[in-house]
Amino acid sequence: MGYEESKIEGRNPVIEAFRSGRTIDKLFVLDGCQDGPVRTILREARKQDTFVSFVSKERLDQLSETRHHQGVIAIAAAYTYASVDDILDRAREKGEDPFIFILDGIEDPHNLGAMIRTANLCGAHGVIIPKHRAVGLTGVVARTSAGAINYTPVAKVANLGQTIDRLKEEGLWFVCADMDGELMYRTDLKGPIGLVIGNEGNGVGRLLKEKCDLTAAIPMKGDIDSLNASVAAGVLAYEIVRQRMG
C-alpha cells in the first residue's frame, strides 16, 4: 500500500502516526527536549527502530512546513515495507531460486528508484536496504521506480550483515560488485543469489564485502573508472539473468 511521502509535525500527530502503524523513516527531535510527550515519541521510535536525529531549533525550523513542529518532525515513508520473509515467500510462490538485491547505503533516491525498477524487470524477488545511512522509500524513489515499487517488495533491516547470514542459512550465496573482482563473465552466477551493490561514493563496506562469497567486476573500457551505482546494478543483474536463462 502506498502513501504520499509526508512530514508529520507536532507531538500528538507524530504519536498517532506511530501508533497507527505508519512507517516512519526518520524522526527529528529538538536536542535536549525530554518532556513526557517527547519521551513517549522516543519509546515508539525505539519499538519501530526508527532512525532518530537530535537537532537544533534552527534545523527543525528549516525542515518545518507548518512552523508548528513543537520540537518533533517525523518523515513518513511513501510506501510500506515488506519483510525478508515476504521476499523469500515470493520466490517460493514462483517456484524459483531466490534472487535478491542487497543495497548497501544508497543515498540518492533516483538511484534507489532506478534499482527497484531494474529489480522488477530482471525478475528479482525483492530488494533489501538498511535502516540507517541510506535513503528510504520516498516519493522521489517511488516516482523514479516507474511503478515498480508497487510490485517489487522492499525490506528495510537494521543490519545487512546479519541479514546476509540469515539468508545464507536459507541457501543463498552472495556476489558483490567490486572493481577488483573476477570478471563477471567468468563467474558462475546461477542458483539462489544475492546481488550486493554499494553506495555511490565508497562502494560496498568492508565488513559486508567479507561476508560475500565472491566479487564480480564489470569490464571497463573508457577513461573513467566507475559506473553509476544503479547502472552497475543493472549490468550485473542482467548477467545473472543471462546465466539463469542458460
Image (tube, rainbow, N blue to C red):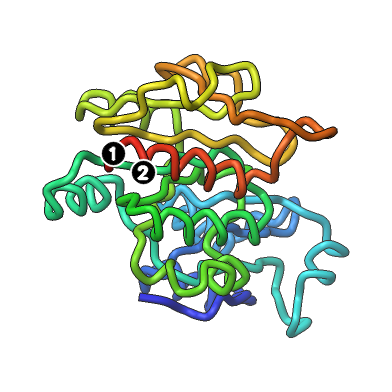
Pick the residue in front: 111 or 8: 111
**Percent x, y of residue 53:** 68, 50
**Given contact means CB atoms under 8 Å apart, are the residues at marks 1 and 2 in contact?**
yes
* Figure check: 206 above or below 105: above
**Quadrant (top left/top right/bottom left/bottom right) for the N terminus:** bottom left
* Figure check: 164 above or below 120: above
* Figure check: 58 above or below 51: below
For residue 244, the mark is 1
Pick the residue in front: 80 or 33: 80
Residue 132 visible somewhere in the drawing: yes
Residue drawn where x is 69% and y is 45% of the image: 228
Q: In this view, does 196 lie to the left or right of 55?
A: left
Real-space CA distance between mark 1 and mark 2, rounded to the nearest whole angstrom: 5 Å
**Percent x, y of residue 133:** 63, 43
Residue drawn where x is 57% and y is 55% of the image: 112
Q: In which quarter of the image is residue 197?
A: top right
Instruction: Identify the residue under disc 2.
Output: 241
- Amino acid type, residue under disc 1 in the picture: Arg
